[in-house]
Image (cartoon, grey):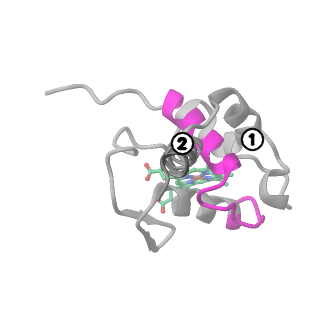
Amino acid sequence: MDKAFIVVAVLMTAGGFHLAHTGNADKGKVLFESAALGGATTGKSCATCHDGGKGLGSSLFERKHFTIMGREENSLADVVNVCIDQPLGGTGLDPRGEEMNHLIAYMKTLIKQPTKK
Ligand code: HEC
């Protein structure tokens, strides 16, 4: 295999990783407050119920398992999609897509760090 190929492959991998894990909290805020997110049909946005982080547990980003509205979910993206599905009456986002990353980045800014005991 030639060296240039390896360099390109490494850069592409690194770039993909970067994209998959970087959300923009400002863009996330707009989505969080949008009553059109995921084609929402109920006139509600995330902020209707979670304004300022209300109802988002402080351990949200540490948990690996979630129970939401009677369903078991294993990722935060899936939990977000349950809320888009149900209260917003929309269609879930691509769990690895840009909008999801932005939303999650914004939610991070809402969660107060758990106080150490
Ligand atoms: C009509 C009110 C309502 C709207 C609108 C709503 N949610 Fe929720 N959300 C809830 C309720 C209620 C729960 C808790 C459900 C449970 O415990 O079964 C919840 C739970 C969550 C949780 C899990 C919190 C935790 O600590 O376990 C996340 C994350 C979340 N919502 C994100 C969102 C996002 C993102 C949106 C916008 C797409 C949204 N929600 C829209 C009512 C809402």
The vertical placement of 93 against 49, above or below, is below
Residue closer to the observer: 87 or 63: 63
The vertical placement of 114 against 11, above or below, is above
Left/right placement of residue 59 relative to residue 25 reads left
Mark 2 Cα within 10 Å, few/some/many (few <14, many 20+)? Answer: few
Left/right placement of residue 37 relative to residue 101 reads right
Residue in view at x 58 percent, y 56 percent: 80
The vertical placement of 31 against 70, above or below, is above
Q: Position of residue 73 (x, y in %)?
A: 44, 68
Indicate which disc residue 11 carries: 2
Q: Earlier in the sequence, mark 1 or mark 2?
A: 2
Bounds of the magenta segment: 85-110
Question: Residue tagged by mark 1?
Answer: 31
Are the residues flagged by discs 1 and 2 in contact, CB closer than 8 Å? no
Q: Look at the image and tell me whether residue 62 can be seen.
A: yes
Instruction: Give the image quarter of residue 11.
Output: top right
Q: Position of residue 51 (x, y in %)?
A: 63, 34
- Mark 1 → mark 2, Cα distance in angstroms: 30 Å
**Which amino acid, mark 1?**
Leu
Say which of marks 1 and 2 sits in front.
2
Left/right placement of residue 67 relative to residue 108 reads left
Residue in view at x 79 percent, y 51 percent: 37
Does mark 1 have its CB less than 8 Å from ligand 1? Answer: yes
Left/right placement of residue 57 relative to residue 104 reads left
